[in-house]
Image: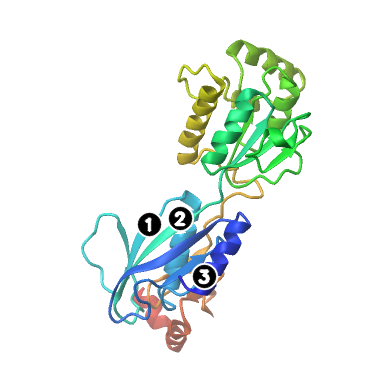
């Protein structure tokens, strides 16, 4: 990866912002990009680095944005000829491509999951230790808990107020107060937009706390979503075992995409951009970043490059008829 792309990746990683990397892993001449060429793509479609010219970049950006939405890597092939299907390779035909074929691997890099713990119980301590070991960002909200009690946490807050907390794209909130300010902690957790809220307690205790929160006006749908008792049923007994069962459930939900903030939340994952079809080469073009635009017979047309626009403008009727 070149220095510009590497610097951008480090900058985005430090800021806990999502991005995707695209790397050419195979090329058939003639191509301007060679194996090893790489770029960083942001959710907004910014590209830093080099993975090919104007006909390759729009497809790479589109597929990188798709990878950021679903969290899955992909291998794509960009070629002027459509060949036989290859398992695991998504093929894109580019008629304006000057020649050659590029195979490009796209890898999304999403910010680390944020594990938010409410409480200072032994289970909370075990969750902080194991969560940090798994690479999660751990924040603790526990009145009366000294900072040194949670050496693995990024921050320890001496209050239960989560208003204004900077939640990331994926989050898990676990109330592990275990008899100490349970109601207050759970009410604070349910006031957040985080879809996964777990409560470390017995079923009987949860019913009692639920009745209290219903009396406080917490919506039934929000209460129905609480995972209580927390974690998978591993017959856990010790605090470390309970923490393990909770983290096992978090992993299961994380891999299914169930820990992302709702789409309406400020930090929701990027939406697919508006697109149009280039009437000359047949490429799918993002309208916002199109490199050419023409208006003809009351309609707008968008192009992947100035060359396609120039060809269209010479005789629009010819290409619209062909299309």
In the picture shown, does residue 261 fall above or below 318? Answer: above
- For label 3, the residue is 5
**Considering the image in quadrants, where does the C terminus appear?**
bottom left
Q: Nearer the viewer, mark 2 or mark 3?
A: 3
Taking depth in this image into account, of 254 and 11 the one nearest to the observer is 11
Count every numbered label the image shows and give the total: 3
> Label 3 vs label 1: CA separation?
19 Å
Which quarter of the figure has residue 143? top right
Taking depth in this image into account, of 283 and 68 the one nearest to the observer is 68
Percent across and percent down for residue 118 are 68, 30
Percent across and percent down for residue 29 are 28, 80
Is there a contact, CB below 8 Å, between mark 3 and mark 1? no
In the picture shown, does residue 187 fall above or below 102? Answer: above
Left or right placement of residue 63 versus residue 183 in this view: left
> Label 2 vs label 3: CA separation?
18 Å
- For label 2, the residue is 67
Q: Extreme top residue here? A: 204
Label 2: which secondary element: helix
> Label 2 vs label 1: CA separation?
7 Å
> What residue do we see at 72% from left, 43% from top?
165
Percent across and percent down for residue 94 are 35, 73
Percent across and percent down for residue 64 are 46, 61
Label 3: which secondary element: helix
Q: Earlier in the sequence, mark 2 or mark 1?
A: 2
Is there a contact, CB below 8 Å, between mark 2 and mark 1? yes
How many C-alpha atoms fall within 10 Å of the one at disc 2: few (<14), some, or many (≥20)? many
- For label 1, the residue is 74
């Amino acid at each position: 990866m070149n220095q510009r792309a590497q610097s951008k990746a480090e900058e985005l990683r430090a800021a806990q912002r999502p991005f995707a990397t695209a790397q050419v892993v195979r090329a058939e001449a003639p191509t301007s990009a060679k194996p090893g060429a790489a770029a960083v793509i942001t959710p907004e479609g910014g590209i830093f680095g080099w993975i090919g010219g104007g006909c390759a970049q729009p497809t790479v950006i589109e597929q990188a944005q798709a990878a950021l939405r679903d969290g899955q890597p992909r291998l794509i092939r960009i070629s002027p000829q459509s060949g036989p299907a290859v398992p695991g390779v998504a093929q894109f035909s580019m008629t304006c491509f000057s020649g050659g074929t590029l195979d490009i691997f796209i890898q999304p890099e999403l910010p680390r999951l944020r594990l938010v713990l409410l409480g200072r119980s032994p289970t909370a301590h075990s969750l902080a230790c194991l969560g940090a070991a798994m690479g999660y960002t751990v924040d603790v909200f526990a009145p009366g808990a000294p900072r040194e009690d949670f050496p693995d946490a990024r921050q320890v807050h001496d209050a239960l107020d989560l208003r204004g907390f900077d939640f990331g794209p994926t989050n898990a909130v676990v109330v592990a107060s275990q008899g100490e300010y349970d109601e207050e902690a759970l009410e604070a957790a349910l006031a957040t937009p985080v879809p996964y809220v777990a409560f470390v307690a017995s079923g009987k205790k949860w019913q009692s706390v639920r009745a209290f929160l219903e009396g406080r006006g917490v919506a039934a749908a929000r209460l129905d979503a609480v995972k209580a008792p927390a974690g998978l049923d591993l017959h856990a007994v010790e605090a470390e075992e309970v923490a393990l069962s909770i983290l096992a459930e978090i992993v299961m939900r994380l891999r299914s995409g169930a820990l992302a903030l709702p789409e309406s939340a400020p930090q929701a994952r990027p939406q697919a951009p508006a697109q149009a079809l280039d009437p000359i080469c047949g490429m799918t073009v993002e309208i916002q970043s199109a490199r050419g635009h023409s208006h003809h017979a009351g309609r707008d047309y968008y192009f992947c490059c100035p060359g396609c626009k120039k060809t269209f403008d010479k005789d629009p009727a010819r290409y619209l008829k062909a299309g």
